[in-house]
Amino acid sequence: MMSADLRPLGSLVKAPGGKGNLKALVIAAAIESAFVAVLIWQSATQTPPPAAINAPVTISLVPPAPPKPLPPTPKPKVQPKPVPRPTPRPTPRPVPHPVAKPQEKIPVPPSPLPSPVQAPAPKVIATPPPPPQSPAPVSPAVREDYLAQVKGAIQAAVRFPESAKMLGENGRVQLHFFLHNGQISEVKIMQKGSMSAFDSAAIAAMRNARLPTVPAGLKDKSFDLSIWVEFKLSDQNE
């Protein structure tokens, strides 16, 4: 900012003379106006003061107060279980014992008089039965005819296996068995067929065969037999 010295202006004002005073006043007013104008110009062109720098503000975070602990949950009181009262047992009533009645005395009849002694009867000697007659010998023709009927009954019961029929196979199976009173037992395959189906069919034929009646002379006799069971497609086509 500029400063002006106004002391010469005061000396002019104080100088003697009328015109001189007027002149001095004019000059003083002009100088003052110029001074004011310079002050106004300086204030307009003066750079504004720098903006105040805000100092950094430190904010401290206060941690929240910890929550107050909850009061402990009271535990339920466990009431003692009621002790069951013992059920009084009924007092057993005394069982009346039957009073034994006195046995009545049975009058004993008088013993009979001894009978007169009789003479012993004569002994009868039993004659032994006659020995059983030995069965009459069976003719070989009856035996052969019966066994032939047995073999024919087994062969008649044959059922040709379907699997062998589809393949066009023929076969035969040799069987060994015991025959007693028209009953067959202990069957064995001595020679198998070309297919396992023939073996099963031969055993089934022997079980399903309707055997003839045993002749009277061949009862209680056992026979050890071996036969061939035939499977022929030609027999099926007839």
Image (spheres, rainbow, N blue to C red):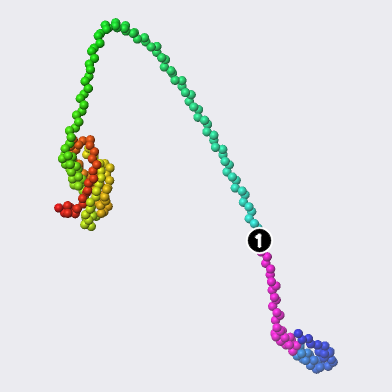
Q: Nearer the viewer, residue 175 or 42?
A: 175
* Span of residues in magenta: 33-62
Q: Quadrant of residue 147?
A: top left
Residue 44: give x, y in percent of width and height. Answer: 70, 85
Q: Nearer the viewer, residue 174 or 235?
A: 174
Residue drawn where x is 39% and y is 13% of the image: 101
The residue beneath circle 1 is 63
Q: Is 19 placed left or right of 135 in the picture?
A: right
Residue 197 in view here: no
Residue 107: give x, y in percent of width and height. Answer: 34, 8
- Tag 1's secondary structure? loop
Q: Is 26 placed left or right of 119 in the picture?
A: right
Residue drawn where x is 82% and y is 88% of the image: 7
How many numbered circles are shown?
Answer: 1
Crowd around label 1: few <14 · some 14–19 · many ≥20 (10 Å): few
Check if residue 237 falls in the magenta segment: no
Q: Looking at numbered disc 1 in the image, what kind of residue is underneath it?
A: Pro
Residue 105 in view here: yes
